[in-house]
Amino acid sequence: MNRKPLRPLARIFSARNAGENPDWIENANRRERIEIQHERILRKTQMRLLMMGGIFVISFAVIGMRMTSLAVSEPIEPRARATAAQILASRADILDRNNRVLATNIETHSLYAHPRQIIDPEGTARQLAEIFPDINVEKMAARLAGPQDFLWLKPAISPEEKQAVHDIGEPGLLFGPREMRLYPNGQLAGHILGGTTFGAQGVHSAEVIGIAGVEKAFDTFLRDPRFDGQPLLLSIDVTVQSALEEALYGGMRLMNAKGASAVLMDAHNGEIVSLVSLPDFDPNNRPRPLTKGDASDSALFNRAVQGVYELGSAFKAFTVAQAMDLGLVEPGSMVDTKGPLRWGKHKINDYRDYGAQLPVEKVLIKSSNIGTARLSLMIGSELQKDFLDRLGLLQATPVEVIEGPTGRPQYPSNWSDISTMTISYGHGISTSPVHLAAGYAAIVNGGTLVKPTVLKQPTAPLGARIISQKTSRHLRSMMRRVVTEGTARMGDVPGYSVAGKTGTADKPSPEGGYYKDKVLATFASFFPSTDPRYVLIVTLDEPEDRTGPEPRRTAGATAVPVAAEVIRRVAPLLSLAPEIEPPLQNGLTLANN
Amino acid sequence: MKNLFLSCLVVGVMGLAFWAYTENYETKAKLDEVAQLNRDIAEARSRLRALKAEWAYLNRPERLLQLVNANFDELKLLQLTADHFARLEQIPYPGPDLGPITEPIEVMNREASP
């Protein structure tokens, strides 16, 4: 680099000669040099600032562009993720106790239309009506020619229907994928399963939501992706359910009843193996609820859970159980049965006159209202109410179907002495058959409470003790004698040692009072009587056996033979081997020394 | 020396760039493959579900009953009743074990001889 000298000799000499101070020249040069230096620094700094600015502009531009592109583009999932455990969006299956499918999903298609793209609305409507008979041609043509952009036509169609619609060749008819709930067994267990419907729906998918039964009660569980499609295991047995439905339907027709229900429950853990309510319905094609008339006449009405009825004499077993458990009476103690029993303005009668006195066991076997009312007076209102409450007969059932809480028992708010007496033989208190099943299970299984459930139980938890083992044993043998020598003689099934108690209750009329010729016949049974495994409740609504000279309506002539047929059909399916019954031990108690 | 180092660096960078390029394409190909497999799995699962549903539908008790009735002449299937159960004592005790048949030809010969 050429630097200009501070003291150029030529100028110094000439300045000396002129008599000037040569230092001035040096100073001037020095100043010039500093100015040049300053200018260079200035330019360098400006350059740096410019570059800095440029970098900022570029980086902001890059970030801005990236943000714009992220905002504008469609989001996509990262592809490199391990997708082994993929999230199942579909509703979980429902299986029976042997893992047979009760409810599953199939893939179908929904049909929708873009009316603006429809070329020939009338022709399309006509051809659609040929495929779907429920379509009205004129209305459909008007809708297809309408101003809308979008129309739902069918929520779910079969592959054959889809092909047929496809063959119309109309560009405005479009299909969206749909998961549809399928109940492969049709009507079987329809009341337990309930049914589903489509919730919020879009073109690509639709929400399937439960509307009744376990489908609604377990809606969140079935839809929750966290459980990864883990199926819901019910305690129902498809084979038993089918046999029971068939036998009950036959019995209902034979006895000219307008409805029937049956509950088959494991006596030890409360699992409901089968629950039938007739008339029933197909959950694949759920009927609409009745808009007028009595809701309990609808096929949708679950008589076994929702229907609360006065179940009549079947309740006597509870009264006798409590009286014996409190130590008030022994099976052989005599009870006053002289009728009619007057209490204020009320009068209690027996079906026929049983004389002045009967032993407690005969009160149950012969089904004496007066005898049971006397026992209840010995027990007292408070203890009776407390006992029934502990058996769960005063609260809604805990059964896990959505209809459960609607089957709330009805009983007088003022539990007076006369209420105590009528309730002792099952009048003035309304409960559902499931309540009765759980109550019977508790008093015959050795005396421990069971909680009715439709879910398969991994273990058999022992419930709270209700009555003693001894009382339970006495009750079992008494109720066995109801079948061998009492009101339920038609209920004996060889090999299965059926025991139980009948109940015939006059139906209350909506105008007040009771019908004379309409009854609800109940048979609450359990088998085998020595060591009960199952409790079976059969109720028939307005049965009438017209085979004899006079129509017979008592439970012994209607519900009992139907229950016997049910047990005959169902017990072998439950892998219960028939057994030779040990003889009844009259008055002898087993002793172990 | 300096030039040699620089040219080595350039070659190295080019080599790495080529490796990254091929790796990128291979990864993309693998991802496509995985996506295809996932689609296949989903399809297989849906097919499996459809088959299970169909199996359950074909095995519904109502249909089985109809089949049993329709084929009664051939199968003679009856409803299970209490008298179909038997005690263990009622079943004949199985005879002595014949032992494994190791020389089938000899047995055949013995059968054939009068």
Image (spheres, coloured by chain):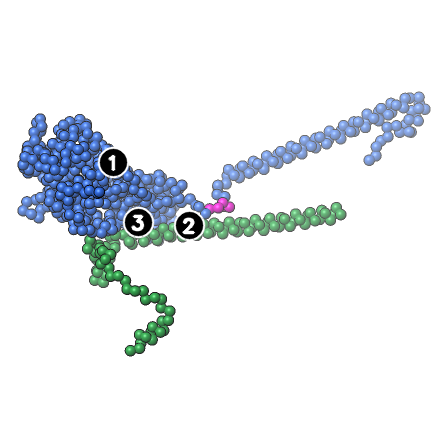
Relative to A104, does residue A25 appear above or below in the rendering?
above
Q: Which chain is blue?
A: A
Q: What whole-number distance in Å separates the C-alpha atoms at marks 2 and 1?
A: 51 Å
Q: Read off the residue under disc 1.
A: A465
Residue A503 coordinates in the image, percent (x, y):
14, 39
Residue at mark 1: chain = A
Residue A282 included in the magenta stretch of the image: no
The residue that appears at 53% across and 49% down in the rendered structure is B28
Q: What whole-number distance in Å separates the C-alpha atoms at marks 3 and 2?
A: 27 Å
SS at badge 3: loop
**Where does the magenta region start and end?**
A79-83
* Direction from residue A545 to residue A184 in the image, left or right: right
Give chain B's shade.
green
Sequence-wise first label, 1 or 3 = 3
Q: Amino acid at mark 3?
A: Asn
Residue B92 coordinates in the image, percent (x, y):
24, 61
| In the rendered image, residues at marks 3 and 2 fall on the same chain | no
